[in-house]
Image (spheres, grey):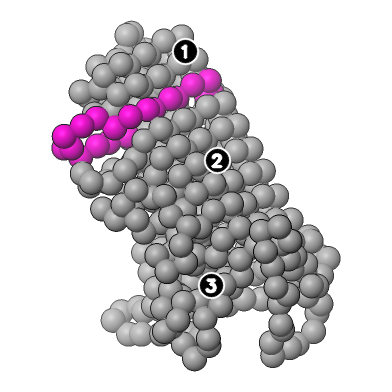
Amino acid sequence: LEFRRVLFRSVQLPAATKARPATVRFASGGTYWVDYTIILRKNAGGGSIPGVMWNEFPPFSLDHFRFDLNGATIEQRTKIPHKMGGKVLDERKRWGNPIIAMQGATDVQIFGGTLRGSCPAAEYKPVFEEWTGIRISGNAKSGRVEDIVVRNLTIENVFGDYIYIGSATTSGDELANVRIENNTMRVAGRQGIVLNGGVNVLIKGNTFGPTARFLFDSEPTASQGWAGVTIDGNRGTSGKLGFLQFHGPKRVVAERLTITNNELTGGHFKIRLGNADTDHLRVGFTFANNTAIEGKHPFGGEKKPATLIEVSRWRDVVIRGNREYFEPVNGRPFHNAVRLHQCEGAKVQDNVWKNAVDGSVR
């Protein structure tokens, strides 16, 4: 099925299966305006969709689909939030305004074009924080959601996150096998990629530009969780607040996080990997062979000692073969590279921490 530059009320999409997926192909190099959200699934009763639009439509789910943008641009022009100053301006944006929301659709690939919002700069504005580029989510009514691929896209100028990944189950196993590969993402008004739920997630070969907060953020609720996440071979600029943060309640699942072979040309690998006061240590954190290219802004500051990587209550921790540079104060090392709190089985070795305090593992 191809979308041409024509106006239409509706189109009947072909049936699709795992063995025989369907392809939606946009006109080559076209531009499509979408001031609300392209939704790939709607549950019965009007739930599971951003805002209050489409309540009268029957349930649908675009499973087993390939969305080939074919060089086209999907552009979200609107800058009007749901509410400002206590006054509702657009009721349909009550729960955000992502450009694409999967909402539980399974076996979906999106590739080959540009998603563009209307955010002019990487600055955080809370009234727009749910305006994500792509929202990938599990769905309790849809069953297992799996095999989601976002590749060869440019995602730019979004008020919220580039991509939000989340599922609404305690173990996170309702969303599995997610690949975010070879995309260019630049100018986000909140986080870069949010990971709040999913199993077997690969984020590889992407290039990142300015991001207002953390490049990777995980703040799952008690009903969410993730396991088996790999962030490998990406490059570009870290977030203004840092590279990655994680914190969540006691019952949330979070384990087996691997960060390898990434290169920063701006910013630093500031990581805050926390843990609530659980009865057990979270399992598996590897940070290896990552490089921050030395530039004009070393990590730290002059007011008080800072720590680059902080890990609290994890076991099987490996921090090896990384390169970072720190700001000396009065010509002497002042800042620390790694702080481990109540961690077990930790190995920190063969790193180059330029101008960090000697032996800066505390």
Label 3 sits on what residue type?
A: Arg
In contact (CB < 8 Å): disc 1 and disc 3: no
Q: Which residue: 28% across, 28% down? A: 314
Find out whether the residues at labels 1 and 2 contact each other: C-beta distance under 8 Å. Answer: no
**Which amino acid type is marked by label 1?**
Val
Q: Nearer the viewer, mark 1 or mark 3?
A: 3
Task: Give SS at disc 2.
Answer: strand
User: Which tag, 1 or 2, sits closer to the chain's start?
Assistant: 2
| Nearest to N terminus: mark 1 or mark 3 | 3
Residue 352: give its label.
1
Comparing 42 with 14, the one in front is 14
Residue 294 is drawn in which quadrant?
top right
Give residue 181's position: percent from left, percent from top: 63, 44
Q: Let me know if residue 199 appears in the view.
A: yes
Density class for disc 3 (Cα within 10 Å; few <14, some 14-19, many ≥20) is many
Label 1, residues with CA under 10 Å away: few <14, some 14-19, many ≥20: some
Q: Could you tell me residue 242's position as x and y percent?
A: 41, 38
- Residue 132 horizontal side relative to residue 359, left or right: right
Which numbered circle lies on residue 41? 3
Kindly identify the amino acid type of the residue bearing the numbered disc 2: Leu
